[in-house]
Amino acid sequence: MKKNHSSLLIVRCLLLLLLLTVSSFAAPYDPYTWRDSTWDYRSEDSTDIAANVSVPKVAGVASLTLIAYGAAYWLVFEKGWWDDDRSHFHFENDFDYALNLDKFGHFAAGVILGESFYEGYRWAGTSEFQAYLFAGLSAMMTHVAIDVKDGYSPEWGFSIFDVLSGTLGGFLPMAERYIPVFKYVDLKWSYWINTKAYYRQSETGIFTDDYCNQTFWASFKPYRLLPNAARQYYPSWLAVAAGLSIDEKVFTREPHPRREVYIALDYDLEAFRPQSRMARTIIKYLNYFKLPAPAIQVYPEFNWFLLYPIKF
């Protein structure tokens, strides 16, 4: 969706501030033998954070969340159509918008919301499982609330696919903790302005809608798949990623816009085994971003780039 992404961007940034505030109250140190981070990066030591719900902390998380949502409304929604034109509630299944790449954008927004809510609920004293579950549900309700309001927009509408994508993203942190396959693959995002096509057709454009400059990745970790005897010959931080993007024809209105497929080297930042809780949290977030690395485009034509997403 168009306006949705600007609103979700504000919410994500404000919740990230909440995360940093929460993290500052974490334990000042963690045991250096905290875990086998190669195989179970997210599992928490039984002495790490006890499940003991604190009512003041829950109230603090709720208050900061409401402040974040209020700021998002004041900065985005109030300046948009929300306080002006209105239509009857209706659905809009925009499944073909931006060749579906916007659904990956909503998924990514849900991931960041889910991670931020998890940190807040865990700090407030809920159990690890409860924190993941409530975080996914909170991300889902955020998307539902925004799309319900968009359902009354004369220009947009309630999109089931947007809500579904954001909800799946909100539960990704939980999946990464409890589903073994996610020990071998990370989902990532990269962005670099290589073309101004989107901004030339949108006076109020925001980068979250600039899909022809975004790439969404599945990053695979060969080191974790190797037998123990072979690991000494392969860098634990070196991953291989497959990426999906679209060309600028989506925004220039030229015929036959196409998807683009990339294969690239990548970095598994979790392989550096940070020990403190603050460091682990920072690495967890950074690992959702695909950093520049050598890449080849394999569809619809062949190209190679030294530091993709920077094209030169």
Image: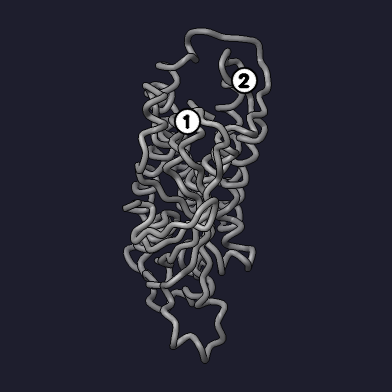
Nearer the observer: mark 1 or 2; the answer is 1
Q: Earlier in the sequence, mark 1 or mark 2?
A: 2
Residue 209: % across, % down: 46, 34
The residue nearer to you, when weighing 135 against 107, is 107
Residue at 41%, 31% in the rendered image:
198
Q: Amino acid at mark 1?
A: Phe
Left or right: 91 as drawn, with respect to 258: right
Left or right: 32 as drawn, with respect to 249: left
| Figure check: 259 above or below 64 | below
Residue 139: % across, % down: 56, 40
The residue nearer to you, when weighing 23 against 209, is 209
Residue 100: % across, % down: 60, 39
| Figure check: 232 above or below 218 | below
Residue 76: % across, % down: 41, 23
Residue at 65%, 34% in the rendered image:
95
Residue highlighted by disc 1: 251
Residue highlighted by disc 2: 151
Residues at marks 1 and 2 touching, judged by CB atoms closer than 8 Å: no
Q: CA distance from mark 1 to mark 2?
A: 24 Å
The residue nearer to you, when weighing 143 against 62, is 143
